[in-house]
Amino acid sequence: QHWLEAIDPRHRYGHNLHFYYDVWSGSKSSQPFFYWLDIGDGKDVNLEKHPRSVLQKQCIRYLGPMEREAYEVIVEDGRLLYKQSMTLINSTDESKSIFVLSTTRTLYVGIKKKGLFQHSSFLSGGATTAAGRLVARDGILEAIWPYSGHYLPTEENFNEFISFLEEHDVDLTNVKRCAVNEEYSSFKSTGDEEEVPKEVSEEIEMPSEQEERSRTVFDPAKRLSCKWSSGVGPRIGCV
């Protein structure tokens, strides 16, 4: 669902888009998906459980190179702080601090806002080395999660993040390494969880081999012959 979000010029929330994509796919329309959705045969489709008003409202903010500098985090004396403002990272019970580690091993941290600002925001949907959630008080790391609905990080990705922290002399002795579905004890529910709370576990919960095989994978060979150009130039043919 998230590749839809990345190639949508408006970056509408992928979770919402994929419900309309399923309708388009089932219709066997020859029109490219976004053409069908916005000005074609599907422009009047309005799903009861996922209304078009919400689809149009929830657009993910994708940061440009200059914008993301405000979210870059460095480590000094074992504490996490924003490089630009030099303020320490302080998580709150009312919000969620999310992070991504870029392929150049630059760390970015921000506050998640469902349907507006998520993991894909930092690097404009680009590749990452690791992604997840964290809790820090006065820059001191307390807990980390290997969770991102967009990037679906693996155990290897999580270990890369831990390696990054160790290389920068972050003391991990008392840092809680939470499972994907686990809540940190100091957190309050904000009502937008996509995970289901479970009993505390020290192990990282990874999908089984059977679950990995059962995931729907987009076949790029399908519908690639469909092309559409708009007033601002050609659009991606795979939709």
Image (spheres, grey):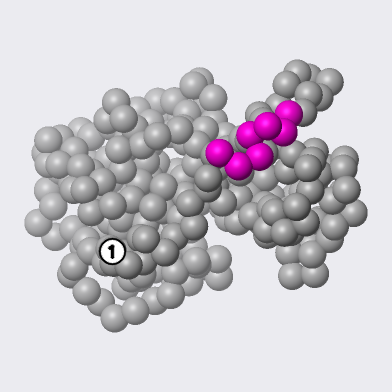
Q: Position of residue 57 (x, y in %)?
A: 75, 50
Query: Quadrant where the C terminus lies?
Result: top right
Q: Which residues are magenta?
A: 221-227
Question: Does any portion of residue 87 appear in the rendered image?
Answer: no
In reply to whether residue 82 is colored magenta, the answer given is no
The residue that appears at 39% across and 76% down in the rendered structure is 197
Examine the rendered structure and indicate whether residue 227 appears above or below residue 156: above
In reply to whether residue 225 is colored magenta, the answer given is yes
Mark 1, other Cα within 10 Å: few <14 / some 14–19 / many ≥20 = few
Examine the rendered structure and indicate whether residue 91 appears above or below residue 227: below
Q: Main secondary structure of the magenta part?
A: loop
Question: Does any portion of residue 229 appear in the rendered image?
Answer: yes
Quarter location, residue 72: top left
Is 143 placed left or right of 72 in the picture? left
Q: Which residue is mark 1?
A: 209
Q: Position of residue 100 (x, y in %)?
A: 37, 41
Closest to the observer, 21 or 6? 21
Examine the rendered structure and indicate whether residue 11 appears above or below residue 145: above
Q: Position of residue 154 (x, y in %)?
A: 28, 52
Is 157 placed left or right of 20 in the picture? left
Q: Position of residue 205 (x, y in %)?
A: 26, 66
Q: Secondary structure at mark 1?
A: helix
The residue that appears at 13% across and 52% down in the rendered structure is 172
Closest to the observer, 105 or 214? 214
Q: Name the amino acid, label 1.
A: Glu
The residue that appears at 44% across and 25% down in the rendered structure is 69
